[in-house]
Amino acid sequence: MDEMSPKLQNQIAQFQQLQQQLQGVLQQKFRMEAQLKELEMTIEELKKATADTPMYKSVGSLMIAVKDKEALLKEIEDDKETAEIRVKTLDRQEKMFREKYQVMQDQISKALGQGPVAGEEEN
């Protein structure tokens, strides 16, 4: 790294930072998708529940009994909608980071006198 120009060293540092940002977005997206699936399953089960089925909702570390099934269903559907929006936002961020990643990777490879690095396009 000592024989590299300061500009190239800076590009590599930015590239590494971009890799970390992409990983962070992917982790958030994974968590949100898992939460979305959980909400979908909860909605399915809640719709199957009868009027006399005891229902609870989590509030912090407490479980609170709920009598109004429709209000609970609406609240969970609203949470699902919010999660879907968040996943779409993370999808857009992921796409943007992947595009920047590819451009920077190509620039660095070119600066190092190499072609695009084989197998790296999928990151």
Image (tube, helix red, strand yellow):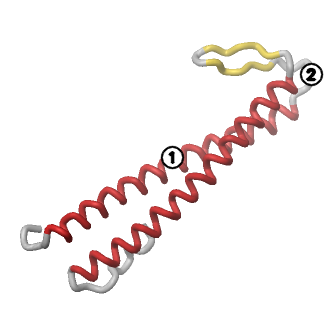
**Mark 1 or 2, nearer chain start:** 1
Residue 42, picture quadrant: top right
Of residues 122 and 21, the one nearer the viewer is 21
**Mark 1 burial class by Cα count in 10 Å: few <14, some 14-19, many 20+:** some
In this image, 117 relative to 57: left or right? left
The residue to which callout 2 is attached is 51
Q: Position of residue 53 (x, y in %)?
A: 86, 20
Residue at point 35% right, 80% down? 118
Query: Pointers 1 and 2 in contact (CB under 8 A)?
Result: no
Residue at point 82% right, 17% down? 54
In this image, 72 relative to 21: left or right? right
Q: Position of residue 45 (x, y in %)?
A: 80, 34
Residue situated furthest left in the rendering: 2
The residue to which callout 1 is attached is 28
Residue 123, picture quadrant: bottom left
Residue at point 57% right, 59% down? 92
Label placed on residue 41: none
Residue 23, picture quadrant: bottom left
Disc 2 residue type (three-letter): Ala
Disc 1 residue type (three-letter): Gln
Up/down of 113 relative to 1, above or below: below
Name the front one of labels 1 and 2.
Answer: 1
In this image, 79 relative to 60: left or right? right
Residue at point 22% right, 85% down? 113
Element marked by disc 1: helix
